[in-house]
Amino acid sequence: MQSVTDRYDPLDAEILHDPYPVLAELREREPVFWHVGMDSWVLTRYADSVRVLRDHETFARDPRRTGGGVPEPSLSVQTLDPPQQNAVRSLFMTALRAQDLTGVEDRARFLVGERLDRLAGGGPFDVMAEIAVPLSVAVVTDLLGVEPPSYGEFAAMSDAIMRSMDGGLNPALVEPGRVARQRLSDLVDSWFEASARPGLLARVRQATAPDSDVSTRLYVKNTARVMFQGGYSTMAAAIGNAVHTLLTHLGTLDRMRDGALLATGVDELVRFDGPVQGTTRTAVRSCRIGGVDIAPEQKVVPLFAAANHDPSAFTRADELMLERTPNRHLGYGWGPHSCIGTTVAQAGLRALVAALSNHPARLAAAGDGVRRRTATMRAFDTLPAALLL
Ligand code: HEM
């Protein structure tokens, strides 16, 4: 009989449907194991994942620290490590803190409310196309202060980039991802030149002035692209997963009409079934995790999805507990590469849940959703639902 580590294929239909039972088995039997397909050590315990994410001196995000290369369009806050990353990361964090997130949340709630009014009583619809994509494009473009691009063209580019995150498992996905990234860079460049609206982009623009340092200009533009594309695709996936959880946990939407439960509940939704399943780092020196020796240049994959259901970090880890506090889950990552957009994502999710829970029509499932065949991002391709009057 195959061992559980051999059975672990993140693209297997059963695992895409519900990864948590096999992740629990892995955590119990072999919490740190070598995965041939991923060519990496995989970590399933919360404490081991936090250790790797925190210790950026031992575990590199930047491939250049372990002899690899990074194409220019990929040099951003996401690929640079401290100390090189510090200036660009704090530029974006400061610019984000200066934004009116209450305004972003209010406008997002209004947009969802309007969409729900149109969908109510009209038969089944696809949550991804009708709510997740428009809401996440609206939140991210509102934050940046740019005109939303056409959904169709943008969704195709974004899909190619999202799929290329699985390039380690399927190298054929790498080139389409590179091409899409370049097209998106051109779009973001045009915003830097043309957009006059207030927003995050206007705040970081002075760092891209022609007299500023060439690499700073590059990092800032590339990071703006990551904020837009990464923010949009992760947000859309999070919305789909959150709606699915709400559909399968009856009564949750009603309870989230309570403001305190809305605030803690949106974090619990991300812990319970978040979009980002894991990340990769590369060891720059030998080290030991969970009794396993890691050699320099070996890759390590902390699995957020497994860590977030680790019973040694969360009581009743497999239950949705809206009131869970503190909730130090890894759904937004941890350490120097943790999500820059956490507060925006929380605002977008609150807007979604508030609009759904306060709408007179009742949200109900209308069939099974289709899970996207991607390993790094847990998302739905389609998720049917109906709003019953
Ligand atoms: C619910 C929605 C979201 C979730 C669950 C999420 C999750 C994450 C996670 C897990 C990471 C860390 C990945 C790693 O360590 O490799 C990350 C990084 C990042 N996120 Fe998010 N994200 C969300 C929405 C957003 C939004 C809306 C934005 C921007 C508007 C954004 C911008 C970023 C950026 C720029 C990074 C890279 C940070 C760095 O490497 O320093 N995210 N996100």
Image (tube, rainbow, N blue to C red):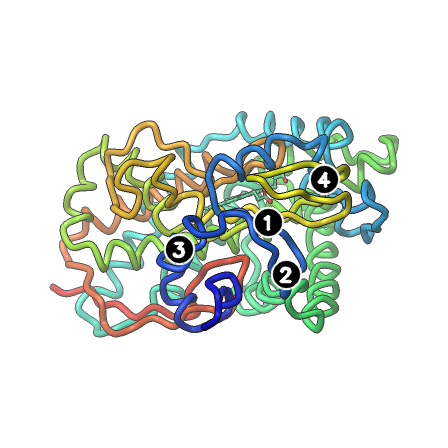
Q: Check the image and name the residue furthest to the left.
A: 389
Res 129 quadrant in image:
bottom left
Q: Is disc 1 in contact with disc 2, using a CB cutoff of under 8 Å?
A: yes
Q: Amino acid at mark 2?
A: Met
Residue 46 x, y percent position in the rendering: 46, 39
Q: Amino acid at mark 3?
A: Glu
Q: Earlier in the sequence, mark 3 or mark 1?
A: 3
Mark pair 2, 4: CA separation: 17 Å
Mark pair 3, 1: CA separation: 17 Å
Mark pair 3, 4: CA separation: 28 Å
Residue 180 in sight: yes
Which residue position is annotated with label 1?
301
Which residue position is annotated with label 3?
25
Image quadrant holding the C terminus, namely bottom left
Residue 151 x, y percent position in the rendering: 52, 64
User: Foreground mark, 2 or 4?
Assistant: 2
Q: Is disc 3 in contact with disc 2, using a CB cutoff of under 8 Å?
A: no
Q: Residue at x 86, y 36 (%)?
A: 210
Q: Earlier in the sequence, mark 2 or mark 4?
A: 2
Residue 94 versus residue 18 in the image, above or below: above
Mark pair 1, 2: CA separation: 9 Å
Q: Is disc 1 in contact with disc 4, using a CB cutoff of under 8 Å?
A: no
Res 178 quadrant in image:
bottom right
- Given residues 141 and 333, the one toward you in this image is 333
Q: Earlier in the sequence, mark 1 or mark 4?
A: 4
Which residue position is annotated with label 2?
38
Which residue position is annotated with label 4?
60
Mark pair 1, 4: CA separation: 12 Å
Q: Quadrant of ligand 1?
A: top right
Mark pair 3, 2: CA separation: 19 Å
Helix, strand or loop at label 3? It is: helix
